[in-house]
Amino acid sequence: MDGTIISQADIARMEQEEQLHAQRQRQAARVVAAAAHDADDCRTLLDMLGLDHDVVVAARKECEPSVAAAPRTPRPSRRRSRAA
């Protein structure tokens, strides 16, 4: 910094901009992953955009459903016929 005093409003605005930037990076990573033909294509596209491993991990965590929020429902069992 150059020694200039920064107001609390400016600090809050900068933090919000950083959060928005991180959110847009995660969104871009998800779009690239959905549009890529395969893993190599995805890696190449992410690299072109400058999105590193940390962004991809954060994007995956956002998409994963919470275990506590969505409990798994048991599947009905399949019965085999006795003739088989």
Image (spheres, rainbow, N blue to C red):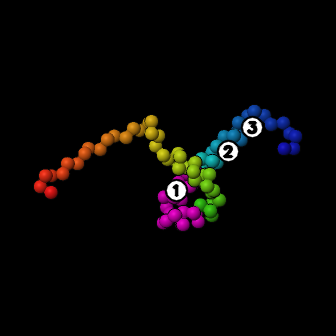
Amino acid type at circle 2 is: Glu
Q: Which residue is mark 1?
A: 31
Amino acid type at circle 3 is: Asp
Residue at the location (61% across, 52% down)? 55
Q: Which residue is mark 3?
A: 10
Residue 17 placement (x, y as % from top left): 67, 44
In the rendered image, is residue 57 in sight? yes
Instruction: Determine which quarter of the picture holds residue 6.
Output: top right
Q: Which residue is mark 2?
A: 18
Residue 68 placement (x, y as % from top left): 45, 36
- Under circle 2, the secondary element is helix
Dominant secondary structure (helix, strand or loop) of the stretch shown in magenta? helix
Q: Specify start and end residues of the magenta stretch as a single range.
A: 26-45
Q: Earlier in the sequence, mark 3 or mark 1?
A: 3
33 above or below 17?
below
Q: Residues within 10 Å of mark 2 (few under 14, many from 20)?
A: few
The quarter of the image holding the N terminus is top right
Residue at the location (75% across, 37% down)? 10
Q: Residues within 10 Å of mark 3 (few under 14, many from 20)?
A: few
Amino acid type at circle 1 is: Val
Residue at the location (57% across, 51% down)? 57
Is 12 situated left or right of 29 in this image? right
Q: Nearer the viewer, mark 3 or mark 1?
A: 1
